[in-house]
Image: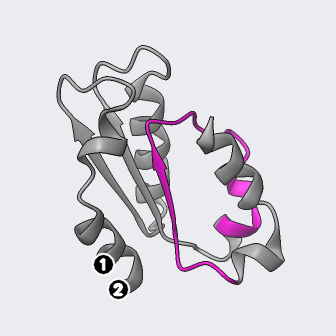
Amino acid sequence: MGSFVCWNIARDARTVAELSGMMVMGGVTDADYKASAAHQAKLPLFFSHGSRDSVYAAQQQVAAYKALKKEGYPTRFVLFQTGSHGTPVRMTDWRDSLNWIFAR
């Protein structure tokens, strides 16, 4: 349920000002993200998801990523083919993903 925490944090402008980016791994999407302080600040957003996630469909994350990418938002998406719900936490390359966030 960590993605719910992240999406709520994204709404707080004071907290967003202290962040370099945000990672959502195998989580739910936020239909109201575009109204958040994080979106307004263009806080880099890294998604990773398993293609066979039975808790949250990967297609929802892919759609959110594509919508953000289309508007020029700093976002990145990694899909783990055949990965389940916990796959992103275990398989995300932390060095690569954090370096991407910090380079923004």
Query: Left or right: 100 with respect to 8?
Result: left
Q: Residue at x 61, y 78 (%)?
A: 19
Question: Pointer 2 and pointer 1: residues touching (CB < 8 Å)?
Answer: yes
The alpha-carbon separation of the residues under discs 2 and 1 comes to 6 Å
Q: Which mark is residue 99?
A: 1
Residue 74 in the image, given as x and y percentages of width and height: 44, 70
| Image position of 59 with respect to 16: above or below | above
**30 falls in the magenta region:** yes
In the rendering, at what x and y percent does residue 103 appear? 35, 85
Residue 100 picture quarter: bottom left
The single residue placed furthest to the top in the displayed view is: 54
Q: Identify the residue position indicated by label 2 in the image.
A: 103
> Which residue is rendered at x = 25% and y = 39% of the image?
79
* Numbered label tally: 2
Q: Which residues are magenta?
A: 18-38
Is residue 74 in view? Answer: yes
Q: Is 6 covered by the magenta stretch?
A: no
The amino acid type of the residue labelled 1 equals Asn
- Residue 73 versus residue 70: which sits nearer the camera? 73
| Residue at screen point 36% across, 44% down | 89
Q: State which quadrant residue 99 falls in.
A: bottom left
Q: Is residue 104 visible?
A: no
Corner quadrant of residue 97: bottom left
Left or right: residue 24 compared with residue 53: right
Q: Quadrant of the N terminus?
A: top right
Identify residue type, mark 2. Ala
**Mark 2 Cα-neighbour bin, 10 Å: few <14, some 14–19, many ≥20:** few
Q: Position of residue 66 (x, y in %)?
A: 40, 47
Q: State the quadrant of the C terminus.
A: bottom left
